[in-house]
Amino acid sequence: MRRESRGNPKVTGVLPTALEEATKVIQALLLAGKEYICVMKLHSQVPEDRIKAVLGEFHGTIYQRPPVRASVKRRLRTRKIYYVNFLEMDGRNVLFKVGCEAGTYIRKLCYDVGEVLGCGAHMQELRRTRVGPFVEGEGLVTLHDVSYMFARWRETNDENLLRSFIYPMEKSLELVPKIYIRDSAVDALCHGAHLAAPGVLSLDTKIKPNDTVAVFTQKGEAVALSKALVSTEKILKMDHGLVAKTQRVLMPRGAYPKMWRGGL
């Protein structure tokens, strides 16, 4: 879904919205990487090659202190810039694309770029083009589209109208590292149990301790969001012990038959 901020009409873009039980996966989306297209306004003229060079200096891990009006504490922290690409320039307006870690403030990034350039700069306009697996132009809709299709669904009862913009919650977890488990372990996790090594069937590579992981059934159904306790390499060698701590159960109890003893 796309949105336009009422408080700042120059900030628009992709805004995933969850319904009912799917609100549980918002936690994973908050941690997902973002992509933005930004118009940065320079306070004086600067050569294009100088701007490209300075933008390149912000690639990688950077330090940021959230702006005064931020919703978090204003303490210095690190954030990763995966890429920052100069697109074009018109006078003192600079258009660039940036892919970044969740929690990166692009307004502050523009300010810092201006400081390095020595001329000052501010964010003129911002559009979020990606949140995790949700990319602008790939099946996303406006609120006007939602209103129209919902009204059409009420008239026709055609569920395909709703499926055109409402996705299964598993869509939100496409980029989250995954662990696939046996059917016999599913209901225990639905009751809050942690995942033990015997329940693991397969898993993604490069899982590290403390990573957020999505636990899935063999059929590709989301069971829970968990915190990995050990790495992929260690999990593959384990035949007992806990491998992930359940943080948020996504599947309702009873969806799979109970195959565990009581006492959880």
Image: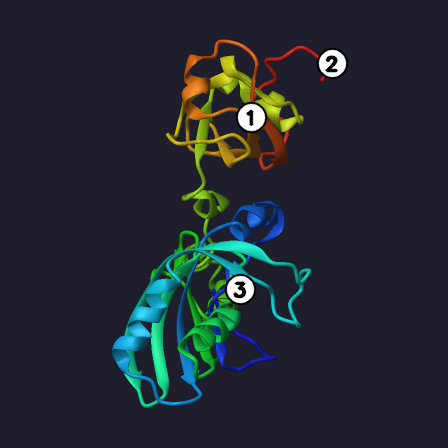
Residue 96, picture quadrant: bottom left
Mark yes or no: residue 162 visible.
yes
Q: Which residue is mark 1?
A: 229
**Badge 3: few (under 14), some or many (20 or more) residues near its Cα, within 10 Å?**
few
- Mark with earlier residue (3, 1): 3
Instruction: Point out residue 252 in the picture as x, y percentages from the top left corner.
Output: 62, 33
What residue is at 61 percent from the left and 45 percent from the top?
24
Q: Secondary structure at mark 1?
A: loop
Query: In front: 241, or 51?
Result: 51
Q: Which residue is mark 3?
A: 154
- Examine the rendered structure and indicate whether residue 196 appears above or below residue 123: above
- Examine the rendered structure and indicate whether residue 251 appears above or below residue 130: above
Q: Which residue is mark 2?
A: 263
Which mark identifies residue 59?
none
How far apart are labels 2 and 3 at the CA level?
A: 46 Å
Q: Secondary structure at mark 2?
A: loop
Amino acid type for the residue under numbered disc 2: Gly
Instruction: Point out residue 94 in the picture as x, y percentages from the top left corner.
Output: 35, 80
Query: In front: 204, or 124?
Result: 124
